[in-house]
């Protein structure tokens, strides 16, 4: 029996990713300490600026929230260190500024 796989590089692709969040995900997966990015289901009831932020620290990494035309959470699997949190924040800011 064939095992189903939903991974493309470091991103689990079982759920769709909001197109506005895709640049963030593409840059975050390049960080060497991140082992997996798991997108959650999309909530279409959200409105506002396209923005990503760290919402929660978990035992296995960080939860990020993207809000804009829709809302979506992403679970980042990585070692939980202050250095990794700062690097994720720097990457989010860099993408938001267009860089």
Image: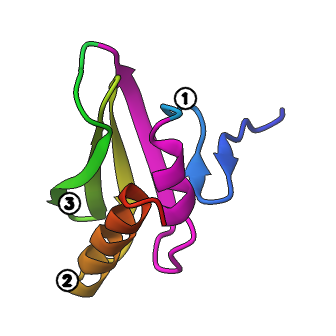
Which label is found at residue 16?
1
Contact check, label 2 and label 1, Cβ < 8 Å: no
Given this view, does label 1 or label 3 mark the residue nearer the observer? 1
Q: Earlier in the sequence, mark 1 or mark 3?
A: 1
Q: Position of residue 98 (x, y in %)?
A: 46, 59
Q: What residue span does the magenta drawing correspond to?
A: 20-44
- Looking at the image, tell me whether mark 3 or mark 2 is earlier in sequence order: 3
Q: Does residue 37 belong to the magenta stretch?
A: yes
Coloring scheme used:
rainbow
Marks 2 and 1 sit apart, C-alpha to C-alpha, by 29 Å
Q: Nearer the viewer, residue 71 or 57?
A: 71
Q: Say which quarter of the image contains residue 16.
A: top right
Residue of label 2: 82
Are the residues tagged 3 and 2 within 8 Å (C-beta)? Answer: no
Residue at position x 48%, y 31% in the image: 18
**Secondary structure of the residue carrying numbered label 2:** helix
Residue 71 x %, y % = 30, 28
């Amino acid at each position: 029996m064939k095992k189903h796989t939903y991974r493309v590089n470091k991103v689990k692709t079982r759920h769709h990713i909001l197109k506005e969040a895709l640049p963030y995900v593409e840059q975050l997966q390049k960080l060497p300490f991140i082992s997996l990015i798991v997108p959650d289901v999309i909530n279409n009831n959200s409105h506002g600026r396209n923005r990503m932020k760290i919402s929660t620290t978990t035992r296995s990494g960080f939860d990020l929230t993207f809000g804009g035309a829709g809302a979506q959470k992403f679970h980042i699997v990585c070692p939980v260190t202050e250095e990794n949190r700062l690097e994720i924040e720097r990457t989010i800011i860099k993408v938001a500024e267009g860089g």
